[in-house]
Amino acid sequence: MDKKILLKLAYRNLMTHRLRTLLTLTGVIIGISAIVFLVSLAFGLERLVSREITGGNAFQLIDIGTGNSQIVKLDNEAIQKIKSIKEIKNVEPSISIGGKGKKTDVEIDATIIGADKQYLNWSGFSPKWGKIIDEPDKAVINTAYAKFLGEGDPNKYLGQKITLDILIPKDYSGEAEDRKAENQEFLISGIIKDETNVKIYTDYHNLTKLGVKNYSQLKAELVKPSDASYARKAVENMGYRTQYIGDTVAQIEQIFNIFKIILASFGLIALVVAGLGLFNTLTISLLERIKEVALMKILGMKKEDINRMFMTEAVIFGIFGGMAGIIIGIIFGIIANAILNHFAIRAGGDPVTIFYFSPLFLAGMLIFSTLVGFFTGFYPARRAAKVDALDVLRYE
Amino acid sequence: MDKNQPIHHQTIIRIEKLHKKFFTGKHLFTALRDIDLEIKATDFVVIYGPSGCGKTTLLNIIAGIDQPTAGEVEVRDTEIFKLSDDQRGIFRSKKMGFIHQFPLWIKSLNTLENIAFPLLIEGEAEDYALSCAQNVMEELKIADLAKPKPTSLSGGEQQRASLARAIVTNPWIILADEPTGNLDSHASDLLMKFLERLNKKHKRTIILVTHNQDYWPLGTRRIEMKDGEIVRDTHN
């Protein structure tokens, strides 16, 4: 029998009981939309976290440190050696040492970070007010330090002078004792939003001028991200420790995969209930139409075609339920995102996208929904194909 | 079968040593006993007899809907019970039309589509099937009943539509099981006239099961059954 006719027949059968069809379809839609909504939330959160970590061109960078080694040092010689690795394009250092920020007669402990513009750019560093360090005597402070300077809009501190006492540890200077460089003055060029510990960023040359010879960390830029494992091995062979954002992202992905499974399971419960509803509808539909099925057999319709007709009905539920469920899941996600952002903005935060609708996942959901229809229809369709026309006639 | 014979001498159905037994509850019931029967292509066979004598069982076996316990049924050189279920279904669809006492319908289709359905099963294009159905409906003077659902028609109209569905594939044989059992006399007469015309004008084999003695003279041959056996076979 022509497939178009089978499709038309299945459609007509469904339309004969519109309310029942609509209710059954609603069940599938709820199940699919619940999964789409919840898993897209997990996808969105994963992306948000990953992007937070992998700002800038993070996949092209490896972090290099000494671990706890007292033998290897991160100095200019190390930079040259690492730069000579062919998979590495560029290397930039950073220094992280302690110090004190001073305001008239008050002091505050601070972390002084020495890094140049390139290093900060690689770190996804972006001041909320002002600009990144572009001259040697400039510094960028965080909002935690701005609070120490005074209340009100942090913007007003741009261009102001700050005074720092910088502690030069002996490990960094190679000297016999730790030393303090007092009353170092800088002009605030930018302020970053960070309420945690007090941090002050300045060009690392300002610290090397004070006698710092060893760096806390290096960032090496790869020629291409796929070189990461070769480059890391080469650096580690020199005695250094490396960290690559790809490892962290892989760990995040693992955690979020579990999160997705948990959320999908909640949606799946709804889909299982919908599947049972669909199974029930198809079975009742068969019982109601048993005389029709007997008639079709008497008229010569093949078992295979009867099976296909019922399967088509089941798959129609799967496909349309899937499509509508995906659309409704997306709409609910967009609405939820808008509501959350509304509150986030009112609370002074930045708008974020916490729902991500992965096209691949959505396509997968459509296939999954179709398969739910297919497998749910399997038994009623087989039963329909096996109907004994004579039994039905005798009963009649 | 000698195909050079004139059509009225050609045997269309040959039944040999047909037995049918089935269980009714725990009791084995013999519905048909040792039936031998030859039906010619131009026969209008009227089968009658008391309830439970095996008329409907015989008709169902000829149509290939029911299986015999023993014996052979040959329709135009085809031993129908050597075919698979699906093959037998296709054979029935092409070569036989069936009219039941209570017509069965596909409720989601209108009358025209229901009548066209056997052709759609055969794989004909929808337009062609509907146009054939329309022609048959016009011939049976029920063209105005094309649009409504068949279940909304009167008993007589439903039976005429049922006849239209039975003949839309232009079959060799039309099997009718108590087609007037549920109709008033006017609707019954009309239906019988159509069956008679199909036999006389269109040379179709008609096998009619009926209790109504008024229609027995219509047949060219009368078969009386009792307790699963043919007790009388009269040619008019």
Image: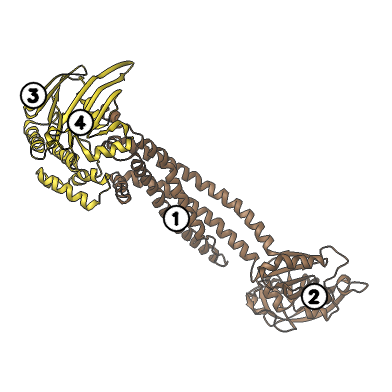
Chain coloured brown in this rendering = A
Q: Residue at x 43, y 40 (%)?
A: A276
Which percent across, then down, holds residue A294? 28, 35
Mark 2 element type: helix
Mark 4 element type: strand
The amino acid pointed to by label 1 is Ile
Mark 1 element type: helix
From mark 2 to mark 4, how far is it between C-alphas? Answer: 101 Å
Q: In the rendered structure, find residue B31 and report the number of the disc placed on it.
A: none
Q: Relative to B125, is A178 above or below?
A: below
From mark 3 to mark 2, how far is it between C-alphas? Answer: 115 Å
Q: In the rendered structure, find residue A326 and report the number of the disc placed on it.
A: 1
Q: Is the Cβ of the residue at disc 1 closer than 8 Å to that at disc 2?
A: no
Q: Do dots 4 and 1 share one subunit?
A: no
The amino acid pointed to by label 2 is Ile
Mark 1 belongs to chain: A
Mark 2 belongs to chain: A
Q: Do dots 1 and 2 share one subunit?
A: yes
Eye-nearest disc, 2 or 4: 4
Eye-nearest disc, 4 or 3: 4
From mark 1 to mark 2, how far is it between C-alphas? Answer: 52 Å
Q: What is the crowding at mark 4: few (fewer than 14 residues within 10 Å), some, or many (at least 20)?
A: many
**In terms of sequence position, does the residue under pointer 1 or pointer 2 come before the other?**
2
The colour applied to the residues of chain B in this rendering is yellow
Which quadrant would residue B89 be assigned to in this image?
Answer: top left
Q: Do dots 3 and 2 share one subunit?
A: no
> In the rendered image, which residue does mark 2 sit on?
A79
> In the rendered image, which residue does mark 4 sit on?
B13
> In the rendered image, which residue does mark 3 sit on?
B213
The amino acid pointed to by label 4 is Ile
